[in-house]
Amino acid sequence: MIRAGRKTAGFSQEAFADASGIDRSHMGKIERGERNITLLNLVRIAQTLNCRLSEILAKADL
């Protein structure tokens, strides 16, 4: 969901990571599911995507 949202918003991975305040390599690992994401980073991502945190969680199909 994060990668799709980033691409829809027109961000490169580097620009999105920078706008979110997250290291680019860490963002790549988050997108690939190689790293667990902290709540703080999830909030940062939601803010950068201009969406609600609940939207991201709902699309994660948890």
Image (cartoon, rainbow, N blue to C red):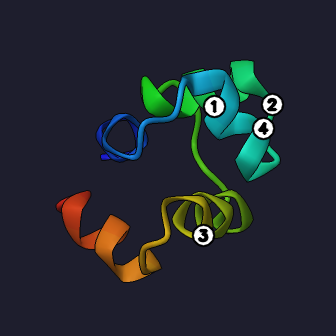
10 Å neighbourhood of mark 2: few (<14), some, or many (≥20)?
A: few
Left/right placement of residue 26 relative to residue 54 reads right
Q: Which structural element holds mark 4? A: helix
Left/right placement of residue 10 relative to residue 37 reads left
Residue 23 in the image, given as x and y percentages of width and height: 81, 31
Q: Is residue 46 above or below residue 33?
A: below
Sequence-wise, the earlier of marks 3 and 1 is: 1
Camera-nearest label, 2 or 3: 3
Q: Amino acid at mark 4?
A: Asp
Residue that mark 1 sits on: 27
Sequence-wise, the earlier of marks 2 and 4 is: 4
Residue that mark 2 sits on: 23
Q: CA distance from mark 3 to mark 1?
A: 15 Å
Front residue of 8/4: it is 8
Sequence-wise, the earlier of marks 2 and 3 is: 2
Q: Amino acid at mark 3?
A: Gln
Q: Which structural element holds mark 1? A: helix
Q: CA distance from mark 1 to mark 4?
A: 10 Å
Q: Quadrant of residue 47?
A: bottom right
Residue that mark 3 sits on: 47
Q: Which quadrant would the C terminus be assigned to in this image?
A: bottom left
